[in-house]
Image (tube, rainbow, N blue to C red):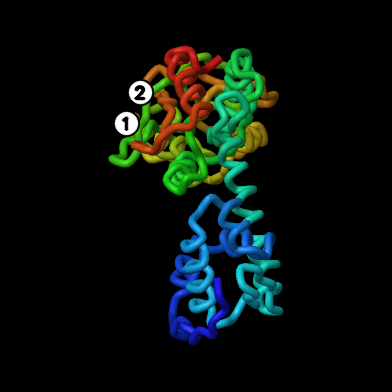
Amino acid sequence: MEHQQRPARRLSPDSDTEDMTMLLAPRLAYFAGVARTEHVTRAAQELNVPQSTLSRAMARLEQDLGVDLFTRHGRTVSLTPAGRTFLTSVERALGEVRRAADEVRADADPTTGKVAFGFLHTMGAETVPGLIQAFRVDHPRIRFSLVQNYGEAMIEKLRAGELDLCLTSPVPDAPDLAARRLDEQKLRLVVPVDHPLATRKRIRLAEAADETFVTLEPGYGLRRITDDVCREAGFKPRVAFEGEEAETLRGLVAAGLGVALLPPPAFPRPGVVELTVTAPRAAREIGVAWLDGRPDTPPVAAFKKFLLSRRGSLLP
């Protein structure tokens, strides 16, 4: 690779950074190889590329940057000051690429890979720990990245690639998602322990039409279900407080601040009584969702198969 003075072929000042990256990226490993060996022939052998290909790549790299990276002495080369500066950043960048490649390979490993799994807050105390415990009987080394959130937020995380699977309610119906119904959870009317209705075991929801309700905030699936069931019972709930978590709502009920339609608690909560709603039907469907058409890694495929096998017995 005889040294020749090449005219700088700089990109225009308004070129995108992405354009420069696309130009430089394929040649960075070649550059690092030549810099490491300080010999074009040996670098070509180590990189398993023709020497002519390597020489042309280095010449083009210098042209794109507009600076000389090497001083040539026949087939032996040495880095210029600009080349040494560039090498420091190139080695850092290549190291990041190697680490990223190692990470995604590790996450996809059938035995030790990772599943990014989202679920509703109300399923965090008992349901999800039980599911993962049962799954890890046969897959003891698979790792989980767990995210608790409300349904719409988890759907957005699915679409953004931040989650592989999520347990949500209601079961989503969207063209870009795949979803399967797994189970159903009956809702109860929760009242303070000293409430006139607290002596009852069952109630028609219409009997609570004049009560003050505490609910989850708009956008939560359980809030939509509450509004729909109350409408079916013939009234619009008078909402005094809105929250983000079911157990917080139970605390508000215990404090006498209203009544609420909620799924059963993981553990009995003092200060409240939970009434079975006989009419209208008050329940929420629980389902698993994922981004349709996105290939599953082996650990994600295994956990998805496990969840689908729990259909009808998901909830304790």
Task: Say what amino acid the circle numbered 1 marks.
Answer: Glu
Disc 1 vs disc 2: Cβ atoms closer than 8 Å? yes
Name the residue rendered at 62%, 49% in the picture.
98
Which is nearer the N-term, disc 1 or disc 2? 1
Residues 312 and 93: in front is 93
Q: Would you name the residue on which mark 2 appears?
A: 280
| Residue 59: mark in rendering | none
Dot 2 crowding, Cα within 10 Å, few <14, some 14–19, many 20+: some
Q: Quadrant of the C terminus?
A: top right
Q: Position of residue 102 (x, y in %)?
A: 61, 42
Q: Position of residue 55 (x, y in %)?
A: 51, 67
Work out whether 98 lies above or below 36.
above
Work out whether 76 lies above or below 98.
below
Q: Position of residue 219 (x, y in %)?
A: 44, 46
Task: Say what amino acid the circle numbered 2 marks.
Answer: Pro
Distance from disc 1 to disc 2, alpha carbons, whole Å, reads 7 Å
Q: Is residue 7 left or right of residue 122?
A: left
Q: Would you name the residue on which mark 1 appears?
A: 232
Q: Position of residue 100 (x, y in %)?
A: 60, 48
Q: Quadrant of the N terminus?
A: bottom right
Name the residue rendered at 38%, 31% in the picture.
171
Q: Looking at the image, can residue 218 be seen?
A: no
Residue 287 quadrant: top left
Residue 16 quadrant: bottom left
